[in-house]
Amino acid sequence: MILARVEGTVVATKKTEKMTGSKFLFVRPLLVDPANPQQFKSGNSTLVAVDELGSGEGDIVLIAQGSSARLGAKDKDTPLDAVVIGIVDTVDVNKQIVYRAH
């Protein structure tokens, strides 16, 4: 699983039929900053993830990727590579809360 921050949405009016009605999010993975383990550092890459949970911009989410991502979709034959499988409430690193949802 990947911890990521939602940075925006992606709209695709033309897409494969199995993806009709799906919400696409633009997300950036988060890493624990080695210099300061009580903070996150944004990853260099971004990805698009399907969201069926209703997360929004600024939320921190859990992402499943690859063949595991299909297990989080309504239809196991959906052609996707990343899916939101959870909206994060808190993250605790070294017994310190580094994130709490508002």
Image: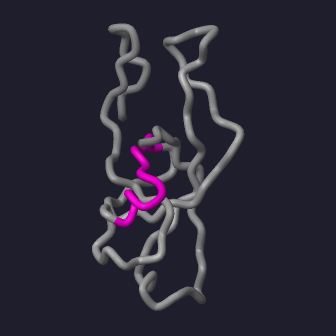
- Residue at 33 percent across and 28 percent down: it is 90
Residue 10 in picture, x, y percent from top left: 59, 68
Residue 21, compared with residue 30, is above or below; it is below
Q: Is residue 81 magenta?
A: no
Residue 92, compared with residue 44, is above or below; it is above
> Is 55 in front, or is 32?
32
Residue 45, compared with residue 94, is above or below; it is below
> Is 75 in front, or is 58?
75
Q: How is the image coloured?
A: one colour
- Residue at 46 percent across and 38 percent down: it is 3
Residue 26 in picture, x, y percent from top left: 58, 57
| Residue 91 occupies quadrant | top left
Residue 8 in picture, x, y percent from top left: 58, 56
Residue 98 in picture, x, y percent from top left: 43, 19
Name the quarter where the N terminus is drawn.
top left
Name the quarter where the C terminus is drawn.
top left
Q: Is residue 88 left or right of residue 42?
A: left
- Residue at 59 percent across and 49 percent down: it is 7
> Is 37 in front, or is 98?
37
> Is 58 in front, or is 37?
37
Q: Is residue 87 left or right of residue 59?
A: left
Q: Is residue 77 left or right of residue 81?
A: left
- Residue at 52 percent across and 42 percent down: it is 5
Residue lying furthest front in this view?
67
Count of marks placed on residues: 0
- Give the residues drawn in magenta, as a range: 59-70
Q: Is residue 62 magenta?
A: yes
